[in-house]
Amino acid sequence: MTPPNSPDTILLNLISVLILLCAFACLGSKLFDRYLGYYALQSVLLSAAAAIVAADLGDPALWVLAVLTLLIKGVGIPVATRRYLIARLNLKRDASITLGLSTSLIVGAGLTGLAYFAVGPATLPGKLLDSTAVPLAMAVVLLGGLCMVVRRHTIAQLLGWLIVENGVFLGAITLVATFPFIIEAGIFLDLVAGVLIMLALVSGLAQRLASAKASDLRRLRG
């Protein structure tokens, strides 16, 4: 286990802060492309955090997990979402927000403070890879949940859930740092995310059909 002031611990703290800032950027963005881009950057940073944990523990399985995180979360999910949802449904700007952006950011700052005081380094056991990253991971979970609450569009809520997943993943690798537990939790959350993606696609198709005109439907007759 690395000491608190080691370069690996400092780098993990820095990456955790950047992951939190990406969650704030997602919360304050109305453009779908930027929203998705911030999530992709957050996932790339998450894979870097997993690589630091793998180097610290010397576990090859965690290196595999870091690579899979980069390929699936950092590349696969953003590319698939942009190609098959955002581009196909021609989504540009998310106007279905229950709170203003400034109000959402203020609420997000309050949730971050709540996460730090609830699970701060002083409240955690001493034998952790990095106790500072745990409240940051909890804050990312809360910010992802806030994204799901303040946004009404299905795609935006889906990305909010994926941010929650990233927060859970960050907390898991700093608290548990065991490969089997992370795999079980990750598979469960990815299955739920897959269901949400299918629901989002069906919702988009239903919206298109609901807005179709009778004259357009007559053209489809043979």
Image (spheres, rainbow, N blue to C red):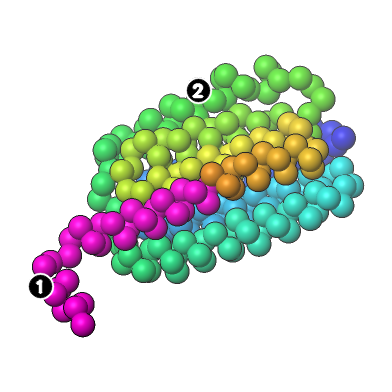
Residue at image x 63%, y 59%?
72
Q: Quick one: label 1 or label 2, which is nearer the N terminus?
A: 2
Residue 156 seen in the figure: no
Span highlighted in magenta in the image: 193-222
Direction top: furthest residue:
123
Q: How crowded is mark 2: few (under 14 residues within 10 Å), some or many (20 or more)?
A: some
State whether residue 211 is above or below residue 124: below
Callout 2 secondary element: helix
Q: Which residue occupies the foreground of this view, 36 or 68? A: 68
Residue at image x 47%, y 39%?
144
Quadrant containing the C terminus in the rendered view: bottom left
Callout 1 secondary element: helix
Instruction: Specify the quadrant of the image occupied by residue 206.
Output: bottom left
Q: How crowded is mark 1: few (under 14 residues within 10 Å), some or many (20 or more)?
A: few
Mark number, residue 215: 1
Q: Mark 2 points at which residue?
A: 114
Q: Which of labels 1 and 2 is toward the front?
A: 1
- Left or right of residue 83: residue 17: right
How far across and down, in percent of the image, does residue 198 sit?
A: 45, 54
Direction left: furthest residue:
215
Q: Is residue 68 magenta?
A: no
